[in-house]
Image (cartoon, helix red, strand yellow):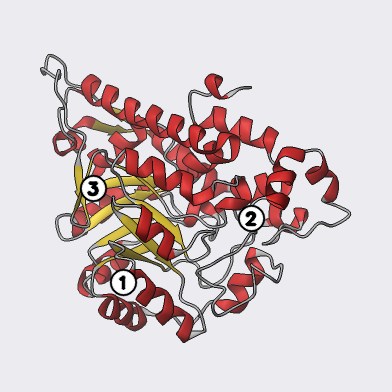
């Protein structure tokens, strides 16, 4: 399969699988336990049908929405994800460039492979930082202050990852950051020489937003589970979230909200957005899908806080269903990670362009000229 033959997320997934060593691919593709929640994140959209209106005069449409005070050109954001230069040497730089082309939100993780400062200096469109609360309070303060200095537009505090989910594919493959070449995995790396040469001879792999305080993940190979279980602060609570919001002082999102009760508390502490998310099914297997929760959360806090449906999005029609259910916008990680791994920046450009075209086409087919016209009257659940 070649780039020009990739027309959707599933196509890019197949191409990424052929081009990546299996431990790297399975880190992107895998999830917790039996991976039922990961699969449900996408299949939940199949349980809901769109009901279009016709003869609506849709020659001109506007896909723009406002999220966390920023007007973006389409209701699809590129979620922050970790370790991107392991998947392709261009990493976050490629994804950020594509987000800027489409004037949409782009995020980097605390475990990003480019620095807060570089993103702040090069990306002028809306950018967020995904903050993990570490036991090292100095590291937490350092990352927040660096985001302020780099003029990030928002912080997204991750609230669903105080411990690692049981990611069995990573246990089987021995995946670590940076990669540890073991007898069990070396053959998979060897039969993907292009990936191996890029990893070995391009810019040294590092986690620059963490390495000022910890060696794990940059100079010391650790599994993601080991990192989360030893480095992250399991005492994080609502008081700590409110303190982070106060220290940051800007647009503040809680990433990993799934219940109505927690959505209400997010409003109470002054958050400006929530990402309705189960971390791509990588944490609590058996959790509901984000799309399944949008309607009841929107009924409770719609209009008081921006609601971002994060996870499982693979089609433009998925975006429209989430917006009609009550979301402000959608976001996703794997949807662009497969494309990044498969073909670098050209791959990300192609999949984001494809999804943007689908959103525009599906809006016309639904008989709407703006996302605000989508509502629950256009949905039927089976």
The dot on residue 148 is 1
User: Farthest residue in the bottom direction?
Assistant: 137
Image quarter where the N terminus lies is top right
Are there few (<14), some (14-19), or many (20+) residues within 10 Å of tag 1?
some
Q: Give the number of the mark in front: 1 or 2.
A: 1
Residue highlighted by disc 2: 33
Front residue (pair 332, 269): 332
Residue at image mark 3: 328
Does 255 appear above or below 214? above
Picture quarter containing residue 365?
top left
Instruction: Please tell me whether mark 3 or mark 2 is closer to you in this view.
Output: 3
Secondary structure state at the residue bearing disc 3? loop
> Which image quadrant for residue 229?
bottom right
Work out whether mark 3 precedes mark 1 in sequence or the reverse, and give the earlier one. Answer: 1
Distance between mark 3 and mark 2 Cα atoms: 31 Å
Task: Give x and y (percent) for residue 144.
Answer: 37, 75
Disc 1 on helix, strand or loop?
helix
In this rendering, would 18 be left or right of 358?
Answer: right
What is the secondary structure assignment of the residue under circle 2?
A: loop
Foreground residue among 308 and 24: 24
Badge 3 vs badge 2, beta-carbon distance below 8 Å: no
Q: Which residue of the protein is positioned furthest toward the top in this rendering?
A: 55
Residue 333 position within the rendered picture, expressed as x and y whole percent measured from the top left: 47, 47
Identify the residue at horizontal 59%, vertical 63% (top origin).
165
- The residue sitting at 46% across, 71% down in the picture is 132
Q: Is residue 236 visible?
A: yes
- Distance from disc 1 to disc 2, alpha carbons, whole Å, reads 38 Å
Query: Image height check: is 200 above or below 368?
Result: below
Q: Residue at x 30, y 49 (%)?
A: 294
Q: Is residue 135 above or below residue 224?
A: below
């Amino acid at each position: 399969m070649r780039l020009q033959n990739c027309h959707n997320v599933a196509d890019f997934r197949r191409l990424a699988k052929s081009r990546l060593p299996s431990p790297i691919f399975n880190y992107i593709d895998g999830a917790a336990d039996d991976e039922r929640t990961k699969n449900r994140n996408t299949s939940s959209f199949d349980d809901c049908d769109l009901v279009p209106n016709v003869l609506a005069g849709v020659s001109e449409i506007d896909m723009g929405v406002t999220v966390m005070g920023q007007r973006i050109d389409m209701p699809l954001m590129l979620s922050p994800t970790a370790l991107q230069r392991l998947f392709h040497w261009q990493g976050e730089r490629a994804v950020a460039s594509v987000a800027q082309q489409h004037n949409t939100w782009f995020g980097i993780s605390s475990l990003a492979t480019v620095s807060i400062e570089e993103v702040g200096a090069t990306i002028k469109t809306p950018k967020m930082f995904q903050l993990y609360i570490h036991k090292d309070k100095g590291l937490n303060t350092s990352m927040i202050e660096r985001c302020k200095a780099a003029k990030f537009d928002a912080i997204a505090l991750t609230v669903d990852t105080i411990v690692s989910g049981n990611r069995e594919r990573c246990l089987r493959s021995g995946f670590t950051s940076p990669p540890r070449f073991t007898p069990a995995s070396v053959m998979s790396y060897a039969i993907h020489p292009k990936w191996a040469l890029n990893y070995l001879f391009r810019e040294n792999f590092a986690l620059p937003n963490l390495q000022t305080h910890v060696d794990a993940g940059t100079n010391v190979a650790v599994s993601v589970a080991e990192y989360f279980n030893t480095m992250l602060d399991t005492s994080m609570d609502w008081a700590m979230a409110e303190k982070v919001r106060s220290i940051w002082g800007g647009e503040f999102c809680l990433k990993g909200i799934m219940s109505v009760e927690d959505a209400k508390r997010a409003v109470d502490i002054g958050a400006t957005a929530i990402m309705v998310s189960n971390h791509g099914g990588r944490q609590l297997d058996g959790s509901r899908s984000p799309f399944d929760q949008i309607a009841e959360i929107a009924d409770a806090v719609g209009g008081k806080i921006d609601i971002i449906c994060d996870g499982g999005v693979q089609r433009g029609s998925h975006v429209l269903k989430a917006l009609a259910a009550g979301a402000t916008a959608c976001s996703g990680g794997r949807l662009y990670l497969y494309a990044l791994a498969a073909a670098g920046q050209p791959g990300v450009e192609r999949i984001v362009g494809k999804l943007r075209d689908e959103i525009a086409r599906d809006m016309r087919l639904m008989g709407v000229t703006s996302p605000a016209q989508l509502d629950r009257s256009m949905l039927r659940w089976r």
